[in-house]
Amino acid sequence: MQKRTFPMHPTSHDLPEQTRQAICGLLQANLADGIDLIYHIKQAHWTMRGPNFIGLHELLDRLHEEVEDKVDLVAERISVLGGQAEGTVDVSASQSRLPKYPLDAVSPDEHILAVSRSIAAYAKNNRAAIDESEEAGDKATADLFTEIVRMADRALWFIEANKPAK
Ligand SMILES: [Fe+2]
């Protein structure tokens, strides 16, 4: 559980402020990862060159939109709980727990590997946050993290299925 203290807005929300603050910490960490992931996927979408270009280019755009939708839900959930999201790109870059995206990646193989690593890290962090938010007493946020993990696991499959079968 993230220990950082967030400034909270007054609200009639029934969860105790301490709980909401802890949950906002989990959501903020997820928000930073999600915003970073959006641009990892876009980097691949923009710079990939090679076989099946158009299929991967279009798939990456679809996945980018799915992540962007979840990022919006996460930032809004912080506001719902009385917190204040930190959603700028520079803050997200400093807080993100994802691996750095290789800027020299060009081929589909290189991008598939790099995007897979980023999505897998995003899914792993979200999976941990499901239990942490449930233990903190917020099942609604646990449900949001669960929804995100389902999306991320499916996205990982969609990307990895482009590799030749062994
Ligand atoms: Fe595009």
Image: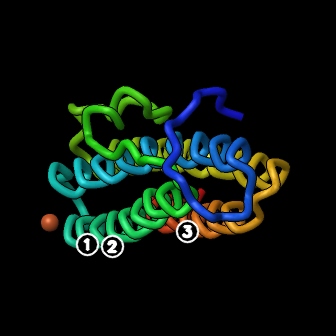
Inspect the image, locate mark 1, and give the three-letter code of the amino acid beneath it.
Glu
Label 2 Cα crowd, 10 Å radius (few <14 / some 14-19 / many 20+)? some
Q: Tell me where residue 78 appears, x and y as whole percent.
A: 51, 55
Query: Which residue is situated farthest in the right direction here?
Result: 135
Residue 15's image quarter? Answer: bottom right
Q: Which residue is mark 2?
A: 62
Label 1 Cα crowd, 10 Å radius (few <14 / some 14-19 / many 20+)? few
Inspect the image, locate mark 3, and give the three-letter code of the amino acid beneath it.
Met
Residue at the (66%, 49%) spot, across then down? 20
Mark 1 CB near ligand 1 (8 Å cut): no
Residue 137's image quarter? Answer: bottom right
Residue at the (40%, 69%) spot, across then down? 69
Q: Tell me where residue 115 appears, x and y as whole percent.
A: 40, 48
Relative placement, left or right, of 123 versus 68 is: right
Label 2 with label 1: CB-CB less than 8 Å: yes
- Please indicate, yes or no, whether residue 164 appears anywhere in the rendered image: no
Label 2 with label 3: CB-CB less than 8 Å: no
Relative placement, left or right, of 90 versus 126 is: left
Q: Which mark is residue 58?
A: 1
Q: Which residue is mark 3?
A: 151
